[in-house]
Structure formats: C-alpha cells, structure tokens
Image (cartoon, rainbow, N blue to C red):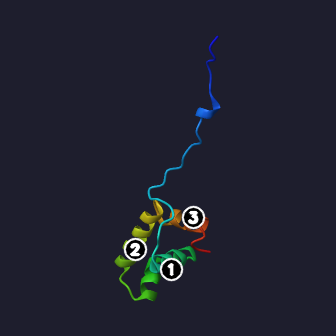
C-alpha cells in the first residue's frame, strides 16, 4: 500500500518577499529625513531647516521609500523602527 499524503520534509516555510534585498544602505541624509518625519516634522519644515527645495525633499523621501521597499513614508518609518535605523 502506497502512502498518499503530505511529506513534511517537502513543506517549506512561506517566504516574505521584499522589493529590495536587505539590508539596504540609506545615506546619512536619508536617515536624517526618515528620523525627522518619524519625529513628526513635515516635508516643508524639513526643507526649510535643511535649506533645500520642497521637491528635493519629496524626491529624497521617494528614494528612501524605494530603498526600504515601502509604499509610503508611514510604511518606511515602520520598517525603519523594525530594523533599528531610527528610534
């Protein structure tokens, strides 16, 4: 009689897929922006503090979200906390 069923050696753990390989390398400016937004600052206030154009800050935010595999900044902040990139 042949055994029909599940062989537990063939069962694999589900894999979480990230958009980018981990760990990612954020620049010091990107880390600073991530921390500032996590602290409740807005893009305009960061732009004013850094002496940069608002569009520059927005593009930097998009780039860091992409590096972290996040859809939006709130997701990037959560990832940053989980990875210990920000406090």
Residue 3 spot, x, y in % from top left: 63, 17
Dot 3 or dot 1: first in sequence order is: 1
Residue 10 spot, x, y in % from top left: 58, 33
Residue 62 spot, x, y in % from top left: 40, 68
Residue under numbered circle 1: 32
Give the Cα distance between marks 2 and 1. 11 Å
Label 3 sits on a secondary structure element that is: helix
Dot 2 or dot 1: first in sequence order is: 1
Label 2 sits on a secondary structure element that is: helix
Residue under numbered circle 2: 60
Q: Nearer the viewer, residue 6 or 47?
A: 6
Instruction: Give me the residue at 37% from left, 72% from top.
Output: 59
Rendered position, 15 above or below 19: above
Count how many numbered circles sit on residues in the image: 3
- Label 2, residues with CA under 10 Å away: few <14, some 14-19, many ≥20: some
Instruction: Give me the residue at 51% from left, 74% from top.
Output: 34
- The numbered mark at residue 17 is none
Residue projecting furthest to the top: 1
Instruction: Give me the residue at 60% from left, 70% from top.
Output: 84
- Label 3, residues with CA under 10 Å away: few <14, some 14-19, many ≥20: some
Dot 3 or dot 2: first in sequence order is: 2
Circles 2 and 1, Cβ within 8 Å, touching? The answer is no
Give the Cα distance between marks 3 and 1. 15 Å
Residue under numbered circle 3: 78
Residue 70 spot, x, y in % from top left: 47, 61
Circles 3 and 2, Cβ within 8 Å, touching? The answer is no
- Label 1, residues with CA under 10 Å away: few <14, some 14-19, many ≥20: some
> Which image quadrant: the C terminus?
bottom right
């Amino acid at each position: 009689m042949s055994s029909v069923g599940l062989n537990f050696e063939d069962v694999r753990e589900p894999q979480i897929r990230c958009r980018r390989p981990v760990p990612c390398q954020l620049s010091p400016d990107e880390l600073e922006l991530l921390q500032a937004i996590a602290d409740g600052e807005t893009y305009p206030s960061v732009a004013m503090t850094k002496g940069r154009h608002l569009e520059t800050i927005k593009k930097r935010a998009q780039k860091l979200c992409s590096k972290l595999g996040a859809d939006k900044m709130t997701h990037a902040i959560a990832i940053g906390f989980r990875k210990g990139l920000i406090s």
